[in-house]
Image: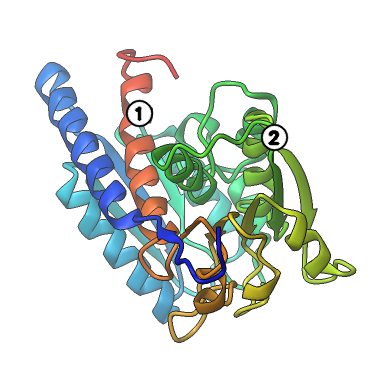
Amino acid sequence: MSQTQTARLMDGVGLARRIVEETSSKATELARRVGVTPCLATVLVGEDPASVTYVRMKRARCAKAGIESRLVSLPATTTTAELVETLQSLSQDAGVHGILLQHPVGPHIDERAAFEAIAPEKDVDGVTMSSFGAMSFGLPGFASCTPGGIMRLLDEYEVDLAGQHAAVVGRSAILGKPVGMLLLARNATVTYCHSRTTDLAAIVQEADVVVAAVGRPRLIRGEDVKPGAVVIDAGYNPGNVGDVDFDTARTRARLITPVPGGVGPMTIAVLLAQTVDAASIQLGLAGR
């Protein structure tokens, strides 16, 4: 690809819309067959403005998809023990099919302990160690939603990952690490990088696929993108800025996700799809 060409944009909005429509049809069919509406319980600790906005948006998407949305709001002073108890109670509630803990939850809470209180069969956000193990070993389970959305985008644009060098920039437990496992399962050769990687630019320059998920605006310089590479920007920073220098990168890449409108919509779409799948499994109507 010539540097004067422009990368094709990977439309997460359109694909997410189709996934939600399919999910809505499945939810309607489930209700018709057994009289049960899939239910997603969202637990919100405190009143962080961004978290409140995200939860409101997810609840609106649930309504469009025919999914019942149950909001459990807890005060910012909630302790780890209290949060764990709430999540365990929801895990035991037969009327709840999926559980989402909106994070971050505050520095005083042991977030990992809270995640592990979610029953694996209801972990539709893919945040537990059980879910990570399933992703790593290719076993039945639920993918972390953003990595799962990334893989669906790659499939939609027919990106053949076999033998490709994928650089994952970021190592979070619910994004960087799991997306690397999912790429590895597709026979990509994966290099994990992060903000402290020595000579990050040199690794990006050799990568056929770049997944930026480190949470630093424009950390990935456009001029370092390999001509013809596929660039997935999973970062979202103030001002609608991703982790990739988009304007320059799109003159070199073959495919690139915009911010916003790329990875973000896919995350919510996968969450809803996995909630309906979880309901089907729990009601004995489907296998993972």
**Badge 2: few (under 14), some or many (20 or more) residues near its Cα, within 10 Å?**
many
* Residue 20 horizontal side relative to residue 224, left or right: left
Q: Is residue 103 visible?
A: yes
For the residue pair 79 and 40, the one nearer the viewer reads as 40
Task: Give the structural element (helix, strand or loop) at label 2.
Answer: helix
Compared to residue 77, the image places residue 210 above or below, namely above
* Image position, residue 244 (x, y; %): 59, 72
For the residue pair 284 and 240, the one nearer the viewer reads as 240
Task: Give the structural element (helix, strand or loop) at label 1.
Answer: helix
Residue at 35%, 55% in the rendered image:
12
Compared to residue 75, the image places residue 66 above or below, namely above
For the residue pair 182 and 280, the one nearer the viewer reads as 182
* Residue 30 horizontal side relative to residue 145, left or right: left
Q: Quadrant of residue 248?
A: bottom right
Find disc 1 in the rendering and name its residue: 277
Find disc 2 in the rendering and name its residue: 184
Residue at 62%, 62% in the rendered image:
212
